[in-house]
Image: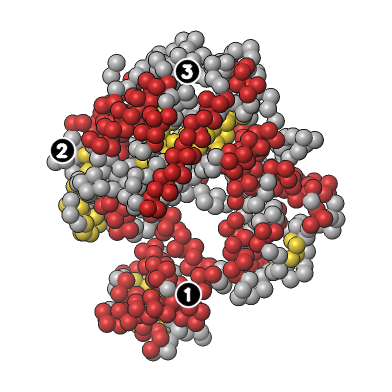
Amino acid sequence: MISTLSYLYDGSFEGLLTAVWEAYYAKEDPSEIIWEGVSHPNLLSSTKMIYTDANKADRVYRAVEEKISHAALRRIFYIYLSEEPESGIIVLNYLRIGFRLGAAVDDYHAEPTVLKSEKLYNKVAMEKHRLAGLIRFKRLESGVFYSKIDPDHNVIALLAPHFAARMPSEYWILHDAGRGIAVFYDKNEWVVRNLETPEDIVLKEEEETYQEMWKAYYRHLSIESRKNMSLKKRMMPVRYWKNLIEEGIELWS
Amino acid sequence: MDALRKLEILADAAKYDVSCSSSGSNRQNKKGGLGNASAAGICHSWTDDGRCISLLKILMSNSCIYDCAYCVNRSSNDLPRATFTPEEVADITINFYKRNYIEGLFLSSAVVKSPDHTMEQFIEILKKLRDVENFNGYIHLKAIPGADKKLLDKAGSYADRMSVNIELPTEDGLRMLAPQKKQNEILGPMNDIKQGMLQSIEERKIFRNSPKFVPAGQTTQLIVGATKDSDYRILKLSEGLYNDFQLKRVYYSAFVPVSTNPLLPRISSPPLVRENRLYQADWLLRFYGFNSDELLSEDKPDFDLLLDPKCDWALRNIDKFPIEINRAEYHMLLRVPGIGVKSAQRIVSSRRFCQLDFDDLKKLGVVLKRAKYFITCKGIHSGIKSMEPVNIRANILGDSSKKDPRQLSLFDLEGGMGNDLNIELPV
């Protein structure tokens, strides 16, 4: 009987890096590294609990930066944020190759693990880029700009610096409703906190005017004789439409 | 008339300008200001025709003194007219920007009263946005042909990008359809913008804080299919614009019939496939090392509508193929149908680690269905036995005949992010 080893960690990035440290120093070859909250016990596999250790995580962090590259560090962080079940083991296997090849690892596109890591990184980067455009803020009565999104991956912290640079003089909230977390910006710095979906939201009076204008603008820009809905859906996947003013169901207007 | 109604009229009037790109500028926000520019550009939505919305693309006014036959805003056309005040444009831009609907403003206009007057109004709007409201998002401004150079210089110091639309590719076409316009009135401002950019770059080498002038460069638009001009003439013109005027982009716009003027061709739908072929060829000029004379000639002045320009070139140069993937130089990899810039780069970097086979190529993003006729991997050829162009052509067309003709070359959209036209790129 084949026995496999599963690492369970607490879901934090430090926890994942601790798991990498553990695999190296215990000379083990886990077949998966998963968040304890989603693990299902499996008769064929033994499990090992990884206890997050900031020192160990920090040593792995610095080793990646020094022995591979800063880009590799960003890649594993994005893969971690993907929250895909296989993200943990991809990080470990990618780093194993990275520690062998150094910064050149990202050029080795034909290597299956490197390719997987690249694809997962791209998925997260793509969603971040898309949402930088598809986020819609609504102005609340208090003057705060509020936006609700439902991303596939945990990208709000990646988006926060983008909006902090653009709207430094406004209060705004970026709410990942599915995960129940939000970025809060107070005209000085941003923080991530838990936030449940608010039950009723009061919009500023002017809000409706600009939403109407935006919808009118959107309608009038399309050229009927060039209509191509499949192209539109390819560029802007339908799953993002529900939070758009111009396409979505209006929740609070 | 309220701002909403004006917006409807003036967005409608601006929609035939295909450019909506917000790329090429990395303008930073200022203290207490609003907005910045993202060098890669960001799309905020897509219309039902699949084009990206990145900017608030409006005319300041559609009350035109000119009467160009191809243009929806021609003075003889009976349609509602409107003109925005500078305050209205600034207010909509800023409030759309804060709600993250847009990256900035694309401001164009019909010629109101005179070219100078129109440019002066533009400058009013730009001053209000940049100086009063401290807005640092993206601004694309249309230069009005025939306006004073001083006004152009002033406007250019506020804008990220400027463009002058050539619209009709030849002087003949212009004479016939837009008798009030002259080609040198169009090329004049293009040259002025180019000089302004060069001068600003020189000045900034000495004084780092000297103002930028149109940092995202200039673009233009050509209408395809309103005149009898061949693809060869259009592509030659584009090549000249890239080489002589250092344009960032030439946009092609399939002619949409907006009037029944007898001088205009009668067509039932815009020539979208032809437009797509021109974009593909344009990419081949800019990123693939081709020149226009390799793609077309006086004897073969138009593109094959069934086959993309690169495939067409490869079949006419079949003696250069097949090439060995593990040894071919980068510039030659780029010339293989089914291999794009990204996959060519990935082939070059991956083959340092190991010899590549067909499976690897697939993983790297090569479209084997098309490339297989033109390559070998470790000496193996997996195309068809014959290297006769007519046979390969038949096979390729057989593969794509099931598809919508507009998607004949539906491959990965490399560089697609921030790309305002979702065209199918040549690979």
Q: Residue at x 49, y 63 (%)?
A: A119
Same chain check for tags 1 and 2: yes
Residue ranking furthest to the bottom: A26
The amino acid pointed to by label 1 is: Ala
Between residues A108 and B333, which one lies in front from this camera angle? B333
Please tell me how crowded label 1 is: few (under 14), some (14-19), or many (20+) other residues with Cα within 10 Å: some
At which x and y percent is residue A121?
A: 44, 63
Tell which tag, 2 or 3, sits nearer the viewer: 3
Q: Residue at x 25, y 37 (%)?
A: B131
The reply to whether residue B166 is in sight is yes
Relative side of B227 to A233, left or right: right
**Is the residue under label 3 in contact with that under label 2 (CB below 8 Å)?**
no
SS under mark 2: loop
Residue A152, picture quadrant: bottom left
The reply to whether residue A51 is in sight is no
User: Which mark identifies residue A103?
Assistant: 1
According to the picture, the residue beneath numbered tag 2 turns out to be A141
Q: Residue at x 62, y 29 (%)?
A: B169
